[in-house]
Image (cartoon, rainbow, N blue to C red):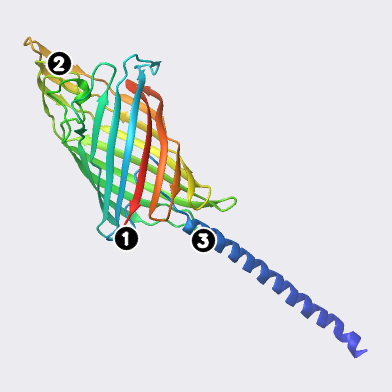
Amino acid sequence: MKYVGLMPKTAGLLTGLFSIGLCVSAHAQEVSQTSIEQQTVSNQWFTGSLVSPSPALPKAGLVAIEPYDIVTLGTGYYDASGHHHGGSDNARTETGLSLFEYGLTDRLSIETIPADNFSWNSTNTSRGQRVSDLPIDLKYRVLNANTVTGAPSVTFVLGMEFPTGSYDRLGSGLDGTGGGSYNLRQGITLQSLFDTWGNHPLRIRVWEQFQLPLTHPSVKDVSVYGTGAGFDGTAHPGSQWAAGISPEYGLTQRWLLATDIVYTYADGSRVRGTDAGGDNVNFSSGSSKSWSFAPAVEYNWSPLYGIIAGVQFSFAGHNTSSYVAPQIALNMVF
């Protein structure tokens, strides 16, 4: 009878312990799964998409170098109404550029992107490989990313573009590689990192860049502003703005798919002066806008070395050229 009388209490105790054990086990499995997901996200290797700017480097003393080779093939132009027209003699340009970035502190980096170009069409070529205008930017990360919540890192950019490229006294329009103006540059880059179904990390950058001309260059003869031989005057370049969203999806630790969807806008440039005959010249190029898409494939040998290849192409626009631009880049961090 005593044995029978103790059964309900004993059974209740065992049931309680069993329930606690199930809860602990479930919690342990949840923690374990969360740890696996976080480890997968943390161990993913990235190169970066083709177009998007990167946040400031994460540690003082780091050096990032990323040389690009880009071939831009003109395919026509978009008129003021957004209609596309093909061209029979579109220009082609090969661009070599290298991104150099150095971590001044754990949050502040300095970056420059020297570039040179060689252009040609069916009847003419540029006079050799010619340097472009040179940007130098400071990048400061005000917030670090949180991989648990997905909260993005936030990096602000402030810099200057120097007029090192050719813009007037040109042999032909193919020789133009700059604008002749000092330009103030500012931007912001947000970067978030998530885990997706099947433990495939997804990194997303949302960014914008703005460029404001600070000077009005004098212009002589043939120039990038559409003037001809004998022209003498000044140009008032317009401001430029670009924004985009740039996801990267990890197939494996080494292989990723990346893309950029980019919108650009440029105010028209105004030109004033006199032509070869002494007549007054006063015209504006009008504003332009463009949409482009840049799918790519990344492969990373390690967290510090990777390669990306893809193609950027325009798919809509107003008052601007259309193009297809295959490109490849090697990313290295030391």
Answer whether residue 160 is visible to the viewer in this image. Answer: yes
* Element carrying mark 1: loop
Is 128 placed left or right of 48 in the picture?
left
Q: Point out the residue furthest to the left here.
A: 278
Residue drawn at x 30%, y 52% is: 64
The circle drawn on residue 228 is 2
Q: Position of residue 122 (x, y in %)?
A: 29, 17
Q: Gap between marks 1 and 2, in whole Å?
A: 50 Å
Residue named by callout 3? 39
Count of marks overlaid on the render: 3
The quarter of the image holding the C terminus is bottom left
Residue 166 picture location, percent across and down: 16, 30
Q: Is residue 276 above or below residue 44?
A: above
- Disc 1 and disc 3: Cα gap in Å? 21 Å
Residue at 32% from the left image edge and 29% from the top image edge: 265
Q: Residue 330 is drawn in which quadrant?
A: top left
Q: Which quadrant does the N terminus fall into?
A: bottom right
In the rendered structure, the answer to whether residue 55 lies left or right of residue 253 reads left
Residue at (77%, 80%) from the top-left corner? 13
Q: Residues within 10 Å of mark 2 (few under 14, many from 20)?
A: some
Could you tell which of marks 1 and 2 lies nearer the N-terminus? 1
Q: For this view, does 96 lie left or right of residue 41?
A: left
Q: Are marks 3 and 2 in contact (CB under 8 Å)?
A: no
| Marks 1 and 3, the one that precedes in the sequence | 3
In front of the other: 15 or 277: 277
Residue topped by disc 1: 59
Q: Secondary structure at mark 3?
A: helix
Quote the CA–CA distance across marks 3 and 2. 61 Å
Say what secondary structure mark 2 lies in.
loop
Examine the rendered structure and indicate whether residue 195 appears above or below residue 83.
below
The amino acid marked with disc number 1 is Lys
Is residue 248 shown above or below 31? above
